[in-house]
Image (cartoon, rainbow, N blue to C red):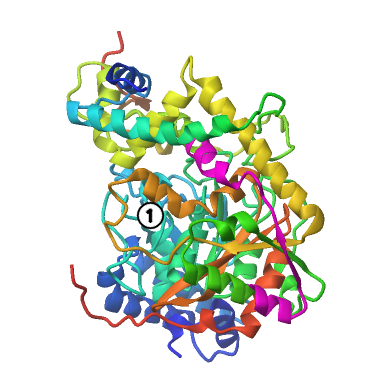
Amino acid sequence: MLTKDQVEHVALLARLALDEEEKERYTTQLAKILEYAAILNELDTADVPPTAHVLSLQNVFREDHVGPHLPPDAVVGNAPDKEDGFFKVPRII
Amino acid sequence: MDLYYLPAHELHRLLVRREVSAVEICRAVFERIAAVEETVRSYLTLDRDGALARAAAVDRELRAGGELAPLAGIPFGIKDNICTRGLVTTCASKMLHNFVPPYDATVVERLNAQKAVLIGKTNMDEFAMGSSTEHSAYFATRNPWDPNRVPGGSSGGSAAAVAAGTAICALGSDTGGSIRQPAALCGVVGMKPTYGLVSRYGLVAFASSLDQIGPITRDFTDCALVLNAISGHDARDSTSAPGEAVDYTSFLVDDVRGLRIGLPREYLDSGLDEGVRQIVKEAAAVLEARGACLEEVTLPHTAYALPAYYLIAPAEASSNLARYDGVRYGYRMPDQDNVIDMTRATRRRGFGAEVKRRIMLGTYALSAGYYDAYYLKALRVRTLIRRDFEQAFEKFDLLLAPTTPEPAFPIGDKTEDPIKMYLSDVFTLAVNLAGLPAVSLPGGFLNGLPVGIQLIGKPFAEGTLLRAGYTFQQSTDHHRRRPPLGGGGVSR
């Protein structure tokens, strides 16, 4: 069973701030969805390999050369805050 | 018939014969928008000036004696999670309310290369998470057949626009049914190509192993023309499948003789509307009468596709949506003391309830102690679902199934119960887990609402889907019916 403490922990991992009402709601709703997902345990999958991806492609390589790229102003063009071509953020430590 | 209701291939013929100009087509569509958009609300952004300028360029080329590409001058709606250079791309989220992409998605580049006329960005469920377009952070789109009902989702704006005559063709994206389900509910053709056939470069990622862009059109000729334009290898997408270009119009033949079509028992025995079941059976009879061999087939793990999907897709989403941190683009919550508080507050304000629910679910399924029990378990079940299809395709060329359990449902009907909403995709999402191509097409009507039937093919067998769909449309006229949509208002 999912607890409110677990929901708070997951919200921190997900970098989401939740208010009390949201915490209550997600505790109930996620518990319901996980309960529904428990039907998967009916299947014995011990010898079944996982499929993360349907394509048989692996490690697509190309030559490492400089091609066309966005100019710096376009790169930071959508930033909420910037200075001298850099992204600007609040205090980190 | 009105210009705005003609398919692209007929408009192309009129253009080439100089019976109509690209500007006239474009104006006709914008007049249609002026008449019905207030009711349907398909578009988040319209670019009338840009569209008219592009149409005028097509006319100049035509006057200069140039040869027109099949989609030149054809008005397109583009789902708002596909990047368009210089035109705001919001994913129907407050998080990207002001995001102006500095580049075009590959599919947009390829449509532009044909001189298609992009007219606007269509509404969707926020970040493509939903089945009704009610989860747009801006407004709900309405079903052109009944404005008190949903158009489906998440590509609801694209499907509603093609149905309402406010776009000739559109692009959508399909992660668990987001092209096919709204196409079914709006009575148009919507194809999800094989994973890897169409470049995802410039598609805002939701669940990267499932997402695929595809066409929403009025008939199969248009479907083939749009697929010709957008498919093919792209070095900028590392999951793009290698392979030679295919001319999909070569599959538009009125002949299904000898085609082996399986009817998955689990899809027809489940809790679907009796009227929908009848429509699937009638469609089977139409194809059988045209010489196809129909037989029942079993996909034993069908019931496990929905729970597996609702662990895998949110897990991938929680990782993909980590990029919305208020640093590089989009919304930022102002006046925060440190970067972690800023990120958490930004994501709280920027994301809607359904997106947060899926991020929470996905983060939980991937977190230490739960990864094996939920995420890895779902990936193993995904293998079983794939194998079901592989076995079915040893005997069959195609599968025929319903697209949705019921026709369009009333607005507000499922928004309070996530699992009820998720069940709208119960017949579509196994296809994404297996990476297969599938198409929804109009199969009939129930109480004036369109019902979609779904054809599912082997990997890269889009041609077989086109052949069967084209043949079906030569024998039926469901795709020629138009919604009873005036220019008037709607009860709320």
* Segment tinted magenta in the rendering: B284-312
Q: Which residue is mark 1?
A: B124
Is residue B459 in the magenta section?
Answer: no
Q: Secondary structure at mark 1?
A: loop
The amino acid at mark 1 is: Met
Q: Is residue B481 left or right of residue B63?
A: left
Q: Is residue B415 left or right of residue B472?
A: left
Q: Residue at x 20, y 21 (%)?
A: B336
| Viewer-proximal residue among B389 and B209 | B389
Please, which chain is the residue tagged with disc 1 on?
B
**Residue B100 in the image, given as x and y percentages of width and height:** 37, 46
Is residue B305 in the magenta section?
Answer: yes
Image quadrant where one finds the C terminus of chain B: bottom left
**Residue A28 in the image, given as x and y percentages of width and height:** 29, 31
Quadrant of the image occupied by residue B263:
bottom right
Q: Is residue B260 left or right of residue B352?
A: right
